[in-house]
Image (cartoon, rainbow, N blue to C red):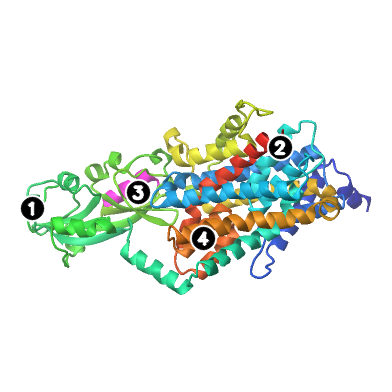
Amino acid sequence: MDWLTNLFKVQDTVAHIVLLYSIVIAFGVYLGKLKIGGISLGVTFVLFVGILAGHIGFTGPLPVLNFLQDFGLILFVFMIGLQVGPGFFESFGRGGIKLNLLSCVAVMLNIGVMFACYYIFFDTSNFRNLPMMVGTLYGAVTNTPGLGAASEALHSVFKQGMDFDIASGYACAYPLGVIGIIGATLAIKYICKVNLKVENDKLNEEEAENPHSKPHSMYLKVANAYITGRTLKEISEFLNRDIVCTRIMHEGELKVPNRDTVFEMNDEILIVSAEGDAAAIKAFIGPEIVVDWHEEDQPQPMISRRIVITNSSMNGKTLAKMHLGSIYGVNVTRITRQGMELFASRNHHFNVGDRIMVVGPEENVNRVAELMGNSEKRLNAPNIATIFIGIIVGILFGSLPIAIPQMPVPLKLGLAGGPLIIAILIGRFGYRMHLVTYTTTSANMMLREMGLALFLASVGIKAGAGFWETVVQGDGLKYVYTGFLITIIPILIVGTIARMKYKFNYFTIMGMIAGTYTDPPALAYANSICTGEAPAIGYSTVYPLSMFLRIFTAQLIVLFFCGA
């Protein structure tokens, strides 16, 4: 049985390291599924299992632990950046500016409350206390990438090594952080006297009154003499709205129009536009009608088909520059991206993975399908070259030293900030460099969770040896209650302002708070009591900027204050 004993005790073997991480991650993931009061800690439970393993001496060589911790962090933040990149800049539109400003205020308040607790409850002459409070801060806001960024920055400040581990403060604050986010959000409901049924009804009314830019199809009869003799392009330019004319019935013949097609009085046309523009378009062109076209009786039967873009050469091209109407005799009426249906405007950039609705003669539609790729199998293969190219650039970018007066060391974005920013930029503008950024949701989640699990396991194993002394004999209880204050005070302030001053829907506020704290359990709870998509919209609107700020401010706090 010596072989089995050696497998657990001899630390410098590959088998031991793989066994160590497999046990910690597997047990952590399964225990994280347990729910208490409907709330679970999820994959973060890996941290606590790692702490237990480190405490009983089941550990590994420090260089290996450091490597897996940093590599896991890079993989995690890069995949987050790649996911949020396409919507990062768009999140500031459509009312998102106010939500993002409120989110920024909450982030700053978290930091402010942390410093207040530090000066009130801790001995400021002890250089260990402020870094430990930084760990407590990121446990209180349930933000693991921020913990990684702060830990990395601390190693650059304390070059001789740290005799403390901020993961202990993180672990103390995290459980109450998860509970406190939901609890403080519920407290806003009572403070502001919110009626959930009324809020749900208001959302339903707003969705009915504000159709946004969902595609809308309608059959119209040309009844405006001004249109007679003018082309589809001229009419579209005069309307100053995006419209797609997919069919035109002229003198008994059904055709697929292009930009040069001339409209005549009494022509019957099928128009696709944004719902919000439908009334104006009808008023200009003519009344909506019911048609009795029989496309199968026409010389060239028309079909509609969804085509998936899998040809990488299409990545980044605009609909206007494709000239699908004039060259192929077809029209694109709508685009589906990541489950969202979008109107096909002329300035839309195609991305690999988009699904487009194409209307036209069957033979022509088949040609477009061939052009676009239309191969589901090709989407299943991950574009790992783009991921590792992005990581290379991200590490180089994160390693650039930025000298700032009165700072003990140059500012660097580091292994968390650099890859995150580059991933956001690649996710949004990668098509300009001919980089295919598409990954399936399952592939993205797999890489994210794998990176996060490696990071949390490494942090826990390293922190385990001194965790018991920190919690029981040290300031563990202080980390718990100060972390709880860091969690709830900003939520109560910002949530009340969002409701009382800006009149946001309560469910939007719940999503905004969950996104600001990057906390999926809080979002899941909000979704469970809301009949609409308001929590998810609020979450996705503030999540990208909040994640960036959490990581960036972690390093700023450490470099400006912990090295003094």
Tell me the SS state at disc 1: loop
Tell me the SS state at disc 3: helix
- Towards the viewer: 496 or 232: 496
Q: Position of residue 291 (x, y in %)?
A: 16, 66
Q: Main secondary structure of the magenta part?
A: helix
Q: Nearer the viewer, mark 3 or mark 2?
A: 2
Which residue is label 4 attached to?
496
Residue ID at (75%, 50%): 121
State which tag comes first along the sequence, 1 or 4.
1
Q: Is residue 396 above or below residue 423?
A: above
- Tell me if residue 265 can be seen: yes
Amino acid beneath label 4: Thr
Q: CA distance from mark 1 to mark 4?
A: 58 Å
Per the rendered image, the range of residues in magenta is: 363-373
Which residue is label 3 attached to?
369
Amino acid beneath label 3: Ala
- Towards the viewer: 317 or 149: 149
Q: Is 390 left, or right, of 291 in this rendering? A: right
Q: Nearer the viewer, mark 4 or mark 2?
A: 4
Q: Position of residue 271 (x, y in %)?
A: 22, 56
Q: Is residue 335 above or below residue 184?
A: above
Amino acid beneath label 2: Cys
Residue 562 is tagged as: 2
